[in-house]
Each structure stands twice: as C-alpha cells, then as structure tokens.
C-alpha cells in the first residue's frame, strides 16, 4: 500500500470520525513508513499536530510497566507464578476470603488477580473521571498511603477477568520494590532511554508541558477543553509520549524487543508476552501479559487502548509481518469505540488481511437453539463498571422472527433491541458473529461453550464470560412481574375509586 492509498484511508476515517486532532502512523520493519497529523493540538494557539506533539497515552502505560516486570523476570528477580505479596514492600494484597489462593504476578499481568476495578468508588465518581485521581499540582499520595497498607481483593485470583488500573499500579510498585528505584526512574533508565524515547515520561515536566496537546470534549456548542488531572495509579495510566517516540516503541513490539537505538527484552520473552495467558475459550484470542490479543483475518495481532477524558490512544501490532499502527486523538466523540476498530482495520489493510465480515453462506442449526436460548449473567465483579455498562444486567439469547438474537438487558435501546447471531464457522455451529457497525465497531465473535454443564458465552472483544442462569433469576422477569403487579394495583385502585 503506497502513501496515497494510506492517505485516502485516513481521510475516509476523518470523514466518518471528526476529531479536533488526530495523529496516525504506520511502522514497518522498524521505520515510520507513514505519518499523518490532522487538526490542532490546541485550538486557542492553533498549534498543529506533528510527530512531536505530546499526548496522554493513558492505559498504554500498562505495557511499559509489563516490560519492566519482564526485565526483572529475565534477571531471575521475579517469578511470575509466585505470590505478588512476596515482592511487595509498600502494602499487601488481602484475599476476599481466607481460603482463596494467593494472587500471583501473572494474575496481575492478565487482570485476573481479583483486584477491584475501583477501590474508592465515591472518590472516582466525585472526580468526574473513571479512576482515582487528583488535581494537577496537588501532592500525589503514594500507593501505600492510598491503599492504607492493604489492597483488598474482590474475587478469587484466576477466576475472573476484571480490567483494572489498580492491578498494574501494584505491578509498578513491585518494580519499584524489587529494583530499589522509583518507577518513573526505572522506566526512564531501562525502557525509554535505551529505545530513544526521549519525550516519554510518567512525569509532567516542563519539557512535556510545553508540547502537550489540550484534551477536548465535543459539546453541543463545539469543542470544550477538559480540566486535566493526575493519576494515583501512575503505572497504569500516567504516561505522556509523542508519535515519534511511539513509532520507536512499535518498532520494538514488532521487532522482537529491539529497535535501532537499543533493546529492552529478549525476542523469546516478548513473544511469550503475546501468547494467551488467560483464554476463557480456545476459540477466542484472550489476553497475553498486558497485551490484548486479536485475530486479523487469520493473522495474530496484539493491541492496547488508552482512554482519558479528552484523549484516546491505540496501538495495534502484527508481529509476524513486523507492522504496527498507532493513533492518538485529543478530542473526538466515542473514540473509545471507533479508534480500535479503525486502527485494526488499517493494520489489516497494511498486511493485506481480509476484513472480518458477516458470512452469508453458512447454514443455521436451529436444532441446537433450544440449548442456547436463555439468560446469561456476566462472570464479573459487582464493581466492574466496564462490564456491566457493556452488557447491562446480562444478556438474553432469544428466537425472534425465526432468527437467533443476542440482546443486552440494558436501558440503552440499541443494546436491548439486540444483534442477529450469524453463523461464523462451517465446522462449529456454536460460533457466531454479530454486526456492531452502529457502535463504531466492525464485527465481533460470539462463542457458546460446548462442554457438558451450564452453557457459557465468550466474546472476542474482551476476555468476558457470561454464564447461563435459571430463567427465574432473570432480572427482566422480575421487572416485568413488578410492572404487572403495579399495573394491577393501579387498576384495582381505579375500580375501587369508581365504585366509591
């Protein structure tokens, strides 16, 4: 694909997805093959987006922390399957129940340690941000102070996937406790400097601030700047970087742990991070160590997203082809939905992978629908707002107009209307695909378990499992019953009123 073709694709993206500023680049064989900067980093000063614009890259920070952990693993200083408490000095992880197994380093790296998504929900909600943060300029508490010496788990380690900043904050604390260096100093010395990432940092220095893009929300009367904050969970969400630096990072991720400036991991170590370390079903990609796994038309890929108010970031890498795509925006509507889809599609074009599409030539198997129909509850922590916001009170599989549908028990009409389940595998009638284009996404796989016992649903968008439950426990049944009872009560009162 030449530069003109790539530019045309990016222009189509910007036509579909308005953005105050967007930086997008493609890295191939260790070099930045294509870069496009659109719009402005700051509206008031009319500063254009360039390769040296500083963006908040949010949760992509987690991948830096994971590389630091794996460096210590290469040195024999950390055992991934040892209890995390063996390495923590600042605070401890307290099990939800005494009989639960200990949370390991591997559990933390795969978001399966049982760490809650929010430790102090009222503080997170009061700030207006998703997560615990403080105003810029205020003293930032240490994790020991914030957790008061004790981070209590919400589920048994190894049983539940819950995406959380606090797990990676704990990994950052482990890096600091094992290495004897503050995390920001360790990352600078052992990750950023060796790779030539001179404008990447966890710290908001003058050098960073002078080129930092302003984050915006697209309001009814135009873009409005976001009041920025700083994160207590720095190891999970605080990094600042530029497209130039992130191109060097993508070169490392696509090139076996090294770029033209230096190396940070052995090729085998990095490859092991891309393998499935938590995979609820072998037919969905699952998650590696920090990196989410994806399938692009039969080509394995890894990715990670970053979301903060006013900022969205995305990296996508196809290691076998040594190609990576990055995108950063400082003001776009619903970019948390469409940015991963658009960058994944762009990477697919760059490696000549076919788009994942609804298949129209695979027959249905209504003879198994009776086993699939019913209510499925997420296997998730009660405080996992990300999961519950995505599927509501759970999902239902229903037959409607002679077709099989999946719908979320959600107050959002589009989710409750549901999605047609299209067969997606000639050899496996329990594999389907749904069309998510109305949400800025492409398609997603929905896989039903085949093992004896209660039926489960697995999604490839995230390592999320939903388990079939008795119809009597379906919240919709409760609500319907309550509405019927309320209607009956109103009718009785009206009858009595008329008789009186």
Image (cartoon, helix red, strand yellow):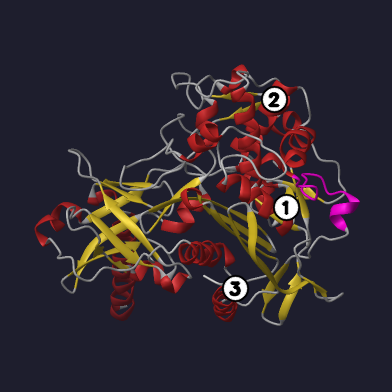
Disc 3 versus disc 1: distance between alpha carbons?
21 Å
Q: First in sequence: mark 1 or mark 2?
A: 2
Q: First in sequence: mark 3 or mark 2?
A: 3
Q: Quadrant of the C terminus?
A: bottom left
Determine whether, in the image, residue 274 is placed left or right of residue 87: left
The residue under the point 44% across, 68% down is: 412
Q: Which mark is residue 149?
A: 2
Q: Position of residue 284 (x, y in %)?
A: 35, 48
Q: First in sequence: mark 3 or mark 1?
A: 3
- Residue 110 shows up from this direction: no
Q: Is residue 381 magenta?
A: no
**Residue furthest left as drawn:** 367
Neighbourhood count class around disc 1 (C-alpha, 10 Å): few under 14, some 14–19, many 20 upward: many
Residue 411 vs 285, above or below: the answer is below
Of residues 252 and 145, the one drawn nearer to the viewer in this rendering: 252
The residue wearing badge 3 is 3
Instruction: Tell me which segment is drawn in magenta.
Output: 196-209
Disc number lying in front (3 or 2) = 3
Residue 143 vs 309, above or below: the answer is above
The residue wearing badge 1 is 245
């Amino acid at each position: 694909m030449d530069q003109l073709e790539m530019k045309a694709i990016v222009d189509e993206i910007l036509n579909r997805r308005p953005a105050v500023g967007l930086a997008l680049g493609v890295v191939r064989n260790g070099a930045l093959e294509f870069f496009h900067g659109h719009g402005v980093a700051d509206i008031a000063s009319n500063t254009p987006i360039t390769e040296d614009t500083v963006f908040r890259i949010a949760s992509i920070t987690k991948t830096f922390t994971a590389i630091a952990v794996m460096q210590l693993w290469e040195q024999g200083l950390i055992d991934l399957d040892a209890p995390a408490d063996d390495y923590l000095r600042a605070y401890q992880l307290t099990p939800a129940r005494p009989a639960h197994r200990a949370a390991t380093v591997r559990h933390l790296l795969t978001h399966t340690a049982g760490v809650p998504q929010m430790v102090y929900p009222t503080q997170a909600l009061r700030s207006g941000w998703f997560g615990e943060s403080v105003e810029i300029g205020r003293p930032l508490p240490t994790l020991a102070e914030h957790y008061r010496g004790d981070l209590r788990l919400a589920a048994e380690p190894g049983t539940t996937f819950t995406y959380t900043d606090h797990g990676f904050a704990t990994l950052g604390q482990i890096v600091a406790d094992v290495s004897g260096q503050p995390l920001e100093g360790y990352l600078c010395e052992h990750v950023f400097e060796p790779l030539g990432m001179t404008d990447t940092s966890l710290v908001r220095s003058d050098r960073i601030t002078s080129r930092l893009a302003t984050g915006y929300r697209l309001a009814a009367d135009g873009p409005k700047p976001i009041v920025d904050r700083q994160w207590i969970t720095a190891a999970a969400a605080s990094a600042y970087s530029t497209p130039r630096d992130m191109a060097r990072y993508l070169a490392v991720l696509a090139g076996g742990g090294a770029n033209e400036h230096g190396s940070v991991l052995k090729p085998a170590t990095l490859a092991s991070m891309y393998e499935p370390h938590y995979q609820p079903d072998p037919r969905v990609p699952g998650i590696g160590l920090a990196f989410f796994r994806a399938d692009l038309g039969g080509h394995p890929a890894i990715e990670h997203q970053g979301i903060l108010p006013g900022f969205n970031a995305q990296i996508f890498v196809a290691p076998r082809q040594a190609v990576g795509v990055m995108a950063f925006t400082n003001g776009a509507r619903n970019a948390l939905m469409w940015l991963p889809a658009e960058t994944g599609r762009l990477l697919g074009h760059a490696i000549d992978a076919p788009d994942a599409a609804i298949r129209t030539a695979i027959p249905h198997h209504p003879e198994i629908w009776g086993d699939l129909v019913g209510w499925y509850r997420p296997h998730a922590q009660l405080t996992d707002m990300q999961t519950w916001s995505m599927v509501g009170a759970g999902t239902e599989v229903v037959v409607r107009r002679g077709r099989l549908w999946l719908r979320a028990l959600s107050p959002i009409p589009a989710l409750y209307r549901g999605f047609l389940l299209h067969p997606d595998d000639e050899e496996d009638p329990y594999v389907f695909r749904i069309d998510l284009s109305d949400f800025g996404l492409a398609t997603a796989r929905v896989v039903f378990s085949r093992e004896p016992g209660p039926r489960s649903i697995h999604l490839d968008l995230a390592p999320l499992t939903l388990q079939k439950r008795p119809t009597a426990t379906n919240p919709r049944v409760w609500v319907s019953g309550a509405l019927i009872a309320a209607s009956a009560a109103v009718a009785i009162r009206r009858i009595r009123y008329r008789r009186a």
